[in-house]
């Protein structure tokens, strides 16, 4: 199963909206005779690829797969049918498929065909690997990670708005490689106006993550790095209750536009999930970051801390006011990783 999970991980960055799945087939004597993994939606599932690669007869054999085999006709035919047709006698599965078209039904069909099914091997690792896919299927919203860079005194910019650069080049290039693990990156209109970012992984992911800008006004600049559709796709999401649609004509035709009915970030997360984004990196400013947390759009935090002091009462904070009045109400985080990136400190935490 560990091998299946490793094979599955080769699909990182290409499988969305699908999960990462790997499969390993042993013959009736326990010899490894084939393996496969899912690379991209529309392409063969892991089990199908493993059966396509078979070098020996699999009848009486065993298959290890980190997700319950599918039983639906989607873009590809059901894997359960292949497992039965090839005469497999034992199926080891890590976890059930949270996709409602499958969940439990794949396992039942295998059992009905007289195949021995064992569930739960390497369950923790498999849940971790596909946590975004699982989250999207259960909640209909994208798994959200919020990233920000700040000084040792918790500032993200000077009072004149200058923020380039707080963290080191090492940290910034790490952010580019982290972006490669996300289906979409979200910022707000203010970050676009202030920083004019590229929001790409610098070619580390192909295609690049979808670049998303949320705006309440639609009053976005006529020139922007996000309007260069040769670099990556861009989606502008605007709040229809406050935006002036006159500004739509400033946005180039190659940029996709969508409206939501209010400024609730949950609507952004739901819309992106519907578009097939399993996970989303929020690289937004204080206002959107605060409301995204309040709306439950953020599951993990990535904080870069530079050994600098910016000072000042009115210099920028990563968050707006959460209106906490009691220390028992503040957000309590669980740090899962702390490391040095050059001279900066990196902290990953769950919320
Ligand atoms: C498997 N093995 O390798 C994968 C599975 O549109 P389709 O036909 O590709 O179906 C996508 C769904 O199939 C996806 O939501 C998930 O339930 C399952 N993915 N299942 O047996 C695989 N990638
Ligand atoms: Zn399948």
Image (spheres, grey):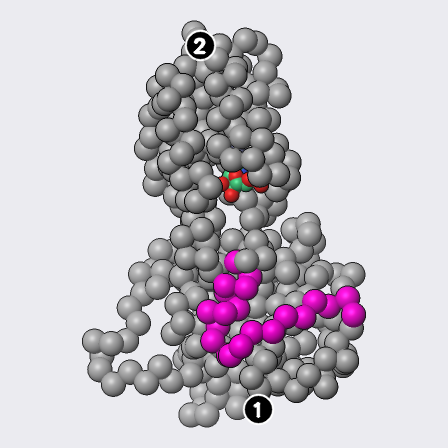
162 within the magenta span: no
231 lies above or below 47:
below
Query: Is 37 in front, or is 100?
Result: 100
Within 10 Å of disc 1 (Cα), the crowding (few <14, some 14-19, many 20+) is: few
Give the residues drawn in magenta, as a range.
253-273
Q: Secondary structure at mark 2?
A: loop
N-term mark: 2 or 1: 2
For mark 1, give the secondary structure.
loop
Residue at mark 2? 60
Residue position marked by numbered label 1 in the rendering? 160
The spot of residue 65 in percent (x, y) is 45, 29
**Residue drawn at the location 50% of the way across and 63% of the way down:** 270
Instruction: Say few, some or many: other residues with alpha carbon within 10 Å of mark 2 (under 14 / 14 to 19 / 20 or more).
Output: some
**Ligand 1: does it lie within 8 Å of the C-beta at label 2?**
no
Q: Is residue 123 left or right of residue 68?
A: left
Q: Is residue 343 visible?
A: no
Mark 2 to mark 1: distance in Å? Answer: 71 Å
Q: Is the N terminus in the top left, top right, bottom left or bottom right quadrant?
A: top left
């Amino acid at each position: 199963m560990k091998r299946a999970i490793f094979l599955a991980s080769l699909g990182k960055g290409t499988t969305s909206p699908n999960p990462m799945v790997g499969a390993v087939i042993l013959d009736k004597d326990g010899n490894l005779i084939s393996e496969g993994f899912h690379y991209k939606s529309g392409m063969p599932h892991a089990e199908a690829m493993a059966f396509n690669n078979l070098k020996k007869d699999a009848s009486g054999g065993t298959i290890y797969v980190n997700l319950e085999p599918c039983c639906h006709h989607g873009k590809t035919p059901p894997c359960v049918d292949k497992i039965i047709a090839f005469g497999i006698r034992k199926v080891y599965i890590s976890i059930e498929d949270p996709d409602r078209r499958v969940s439990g039904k794949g396992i039942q069909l295998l059992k009905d065909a007289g195949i021995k099914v064992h569930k739960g091997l390497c369950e923790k690792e498999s849940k971790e690997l596909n946590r975004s896919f699982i989250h999207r299927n259960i909640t209909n919203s994208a798994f959200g990670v919020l990233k920000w860079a700040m000084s040792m005194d918790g500032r993200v910019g000077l009072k004149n708005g200058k923020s380039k650069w707080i963290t080191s080049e090492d940290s910034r290039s790490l952010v580019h490689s982290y972006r490669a693990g996300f289906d979409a990156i979200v910022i707000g209109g203010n970050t676009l106006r202030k920083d004019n970012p590229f929001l790409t992984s610098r070619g580390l992911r192909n295609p690049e993550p979808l670049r998303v800008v949320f705006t309440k006004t639609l009053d976005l600049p006529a020139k922007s790095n996000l309007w260069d559709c040769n670099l990556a796709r861009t989606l502008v999401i605007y709040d229809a209750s406050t935006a002036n649609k006159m500004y739509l004509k400033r946005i180039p035709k190659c940029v996709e536009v969508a409206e939501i009915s209010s400024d609730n970030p949950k609507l952004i997360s739901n819309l992106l999930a519907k578009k097939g984004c399993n996970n989303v990196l929020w690289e937004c400013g204080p206002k959107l970051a605060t409301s995204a947390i309040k709306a439950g759009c953020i599951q993990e935090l990535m904080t870069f801390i530079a050994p600098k002091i910016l000072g000042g009462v009115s210099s920028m904070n990563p968050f707006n006011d959460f209106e906490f009045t009691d220390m028992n109400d503040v957000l309590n985080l669980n740090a899962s990783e702390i490391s040095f990136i050059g001279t900066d400190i990196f902290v990953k935490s769950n919320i």
